[in-house]
Image (tube, grey):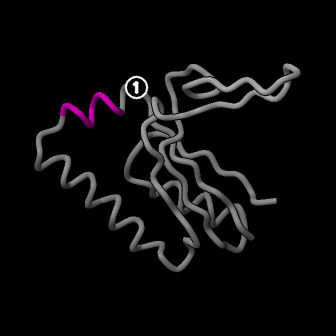
Amino acid sequence: MKYVLMFVETEEFAAQLEAMGELEQQAAYAAVGQWFADHAGQITHHTHLAPVHTATTVRLDQGEPVVTDGPFVEGKEVVSGFAEVEVADLDEALRIARSWPACPVVEIRPVA
């Protein structure tokens, strides 16, 4: 069964990452790289998204489409990337998500 793990950054996490020294940042990025290597057998696709200020939103519920700069919601938490995994069930997806070494929130959704 396929699931998407959405990695959600918070303002606090972004501030902590920015405040790290170069060696700490390298260690944090290495932990993420190791996580991807450890789960390479289950990950079918993944990507890191550009910063939220680069988002463009198209609203289709107001008659004519309305295009605006920015994300569709204002929030302190933003999706910064995702990984699609092929696993036996939600429990296996949860085990993988619990080992994620970076941003503090991982939302899991089954692929329809």
Q: Could you tell me which secondary element the residue under label 1 belongs to?
A: helix
What is the x, y in percent for residue 97? 54, 56
Residue 54 in the image: state x and y as whole percent. Answer: 47, 34
Q: Is residue 44 above or below residue 70?
A: below
Q: State the residue in front, 52 or 31.
A: 52
Q: Which residues are magenta?
A: 14-19
Give the quarter of the figure containing the N terminus: bottom right
The x and y percentages for residue 71 are: 58, 28
View extreme (bottom): residue: 41
Q: Nearer the viewer, residue 70 or 99?
A: 70
Q: Is residue 77 above or below residue 46?
A: above
Residue at the image position 44 percent from the left and 43 percent from the top: 50
**Where, quadrant-wise, is the C terminus in this rendering?**
bottom right
Q: What secondary structure predominates along the stretch shown in magenta?
A: helix
Which residue is depicted at the point 40% across and 25% down? Answer: 11
For residue 77, side relative to residue 93 (left or right): left
Number of residues whose C-alpha sits closer than 10 Å to that of mark 1, classed few (under 14), some (14–19) or many (20 or more): few
Residue underneath mark 1: 11
Quadrant of the rendered image containing residue 30? bottom left
